[in-house]
Image (cartoon, coloured by chain):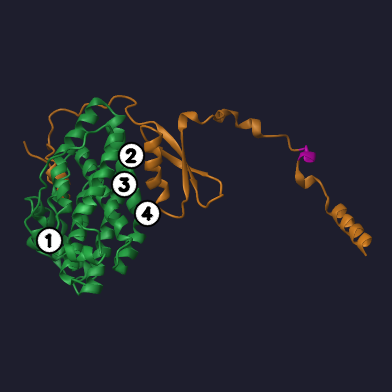
Amino acid sequence: MATIVSLDPRVTRMEIEQDPGSAPEPKAELDQFPTFEVFHQERTGAHHVHVGSVHAPNADLALLLAKEQYGRRGQTVNLWVVNTRDVVTMSAGDADIFATTPEKTYRDVGAYMVRNKVEAYKKQQGEQKS
Amino acid sequence: MNQDAVKDLLVRMADDVLILAHRHSEWTGLGPVLEEDIAFSSVAQDKLGHAQALYAILHEHFGMPDPDVMAFGRAEADMRSCHFVELPNGEYDFSLVRHLLFDAAEYVRWSALRESSFEPLAKLAHKIQGELKYHLYHAQTWIVQLGSQGSEESKARMQSALNTAWPYALGLFESRPGDADLVATGFFPGEDALRAEWEVLVQGILAKATLTMPHDHAAVLGGRDGYHSEFLAPLLVEMTEVYRIDPSAQW
């Protein structure tokens, strides 16, 4: 039986049959590792920011693999990993609960004009001191 | 300073790490999972950097050829790598065990070299400290995982790979005639001292992995005198293939 000859000597060395005769066995469903979400901290004291996920059999390995995926470029001082299953989330279909009606301006900071009051207060304080 | 002894030490350290970097890089694209493929390839790149730094010291301070010529331009008999790093990758179990045993040795060796009386080497030891710590962490995490938290099969395979690798790993610590001078001048602590410290470190990791440390083996030697395993010559052919097309090419 002829084997695959590749420009990559490593592939040639594997002696893979050119015509295997039968199709390869399909993989069992869900045979992959679970995923862990990775949070990256750029500086001491900064927030850990979600940057992506890794496949790993457990948290120890997830942290190890996250180091290379997300910590090898740019500044990093720390990483967190969290099992994706442990992340509690809303349903994507519920995004409309964040849409508030626009006329409640009294809930927005911009609706309050305090500068005049602040300046008047400063002026008053200044007068008291002098 | 005993220049010949220094050259002998630095060349064998550099050659070990160069050859193992090549072996590790053979996993690139073929690793067991994507994330690990990237991590292991990254370790290989770090190793190559360490070899380059050592060849650069040999070039600048001891008048040896430049790093490219040292890495790609020497005949097999002029290489000083030990048989341990020359062995083919085999399955991932063997590659991981070799990674652990080698990086535990590197960790011990370079930790000691931070105190070396030869300043360029001490500086390099400080510079690569973080990488070596990571390499050991990477190896240790996998070994403990597959030894104590995997299946019966994974544990049996790790133990079997460990038994195979052990006599070769001992070859990392072959003493050389000039070493005594280097120990006396505080250049490095000597191979026997390093090996003793390495065994303690490895023993602790293997205990966590519930694996048994082999003992009473004779080290596989020869590489330091230019007598190599049958696996080095084909590796060199492959590794130097592009370089040999035109050794004077500027990259």
Instruction: Give the residue type that dot 2 points to.
Output: Thr
Q: Which residue is mark 1?
A: B79
The quarter of the image holding the C terminus of chain B is bottom left
Q: Quadrant of the N terminus of chain B?
A: bottom left
Q: Which is more toward the observer, A103 or B90?
A: B90
Tell me the mark number nearer the camera, choosing from 1 and 3: 3
Where is mark 4, residue-wise?
Answer: B130
The Cα atoms of the two marked residues, 2 and 1, are separated by: 32 Å
Mark-to-mark CA distance, 4 and 1: 28 Å
Element type where label 1 sits in the image: loop
Q: Earlier in the sequence, mark 2 or mark 4?
A: 4
Q: CA distance from mark 4 to mark 3?
A: 10 Å
At mark 4, the secondary structure is helix
Q: Residue at x 25, y 68 (%)?
A: B56
Q: Residue at x 22, y 41 (%)?
A: B97
**Foreground residue, B10 or B111?**
B111
| Residue A9 on image: x %, y % | 14, 49
Q: Chain of mark 4?
A: B
Along the horizontal axis of the image, is B171 left or right of B196? left
Residue span colored magenta: A103-107
Q: Residues within 10 Å of mark 3 (few under 14, many from 20)?
A: some
The tag on residue B141 is 2
**Spatial separation of the CA atoms under disc 2 and disc 4:** 16 Å
Q: Colour of chain B?
A: green
